[in-house]
Amino acid sequence: MKDRENPIRIGVSSCLLGAKVRFDGGHKKDDFLVNTFGEWVDWVPVCPEVEVGMGTPRESVRLVREGGDVRMVAPKSGKDWSEAMRAYSAQRVEKLAAAELSGYVLKKDSPSCGMERVKLYGEGMPTKSGRGVFAEALLARFPNLPVEEEGRLCDPRLRDNFVERVFAYQRLRRFFSDRWTVGGLVAFHTAHKLQLMAHAPKSYETLGRLVARAKGLPREEFRQSYETEFMQGLKVIATTHRNTNVLHHILGYFKKLLDGEARAELLALIEDYRRGLVPLIVPITLIKHLVRLHSVGYLAGQVYLEPHPKELMLRNHV
């Protein structure tokens, strides 16, 4: 449930929470966001089109290419909202910086909030190559912030990845917000080893070299470099192949602790996962049991075994 001492704040398009702010006066309430994920986070709702003064209900707007520029235009009246929306977006994202967000969920296809593949009009048929005006400003201001669209969150792997990044970003920000030490940094980096290996092994190696140089770099320069590589690494989807490699790596820690039968049981579950017969949660559950049973301290400290609350059941579907 929500951590009141260290709340996880997530920006969100207001309509996804059920607010009637759509151009037609309706909403796009998302059940997962409101009833499941919402139990763990504090939402920071934003509706750029209402906040810029368009009102509800309102004439719809679209993105239109004019020469080398993209404009936000209301097609019926011809009113151009481009400059107003750009000015609003620049100011709004600066205000959001004070909220210390750990993620953002945008409304897909929206000319203000769409993250990608927004309809872009011009000569001929519209192309799905645009990005919402507010989304553009948000992504430019917070390049490492976990951001997704609600439509993409219907994909189990993308949903798992987004939520995993949200909790990772929260941990990362909390770590660097304190007067961190190199020893603490090594511990943080070590705890995330297997998680990073499941996503992007090269990022783990790059971060390791960066950690080795931590004493010789200005602290803010180091923080920015580490945060960027860490979050970009986790943005890579953890594949079945890489997860299987990590599971086999974990198996090695039980080499002298398990008898032949117990080892064979775990190995069989890892193989079942590799073949797509069971979800990731199955071998992970047995591993967590064995970690507790045999007091394997190193593995007990690995974020990979529970990167987000088990109650979300995200690993039941990947």
Image (cartoon, rainbow, N blue to C red):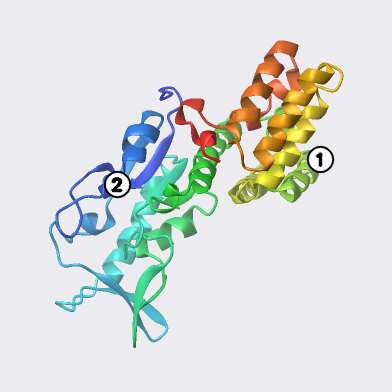
Asked whether, in this view, residue 153 is left or right of residue 175, the answer is left
Q: Do the residues under discs 2 and 1 have CB atoms within 8 angstroms?
A: no
Write down the quadrant of residue 172 in the picture. Answer: top right
Of residues 94 and 16, the one nearer the viewer is 16
Q: Which residue is mark 1?
A: 212
Asked whether, in this view, residue 305 is left or right of residue 165, the answer is right
The residue carrying pointer 1 sits among few (fewer than 14), some (14 to 19) or many (20 or more) residues within 10 Å by Cα, namely: few
User: Is residue 312 depicted above or below 55 in this figure?
Assistant: above
Residue 30 pos. (x, y %): 31, 44
SS assignment at label 2 = helix
Asked whether, in this view, residue 285 is left or right of residue 249, the answer is left
- Residue for point 69% across, 48% down: 200
- Residue for point 29% across, 71% down: 82
> What amino acid type should be assigned to the residue bearing mark 2?
Leu
User: Is residue 75 depicted above or below 282 in this figure?
Assistant: below
Total of numbered circles in the picture?
2
Residue 299 pos. (x, y %): 72, 24
Which quarter of the rendering shows the N terminus? Answer: top left
Write down the quadrant of residue 4 in the picture. Answer: top left
- Residue for point 24% across, 59% down: 49
SS assignment at label 1 = helix
Q: CA distance from mark 2 to mark 1?
A: 43 Å
The answer to whether residue 196 is visible is no
> What amino acid type should be assigned to the residue bearing mark 1?
Ala
Answer with mark 2 or mark 1, whichever residue precedes in sequence.
2
User: Is residue 69 depicted above or below 23 in this figure?
Assistant: below
Residue 192 pos. (x, y %): 68, 34
Q: What number is the disc on residue 77?
A: none
Of residues 41 and 259, the one nearer the viewer is 259
- Residue for point 42% across, 48% down: 154
Q: Which residue is mark 2?
A: 16
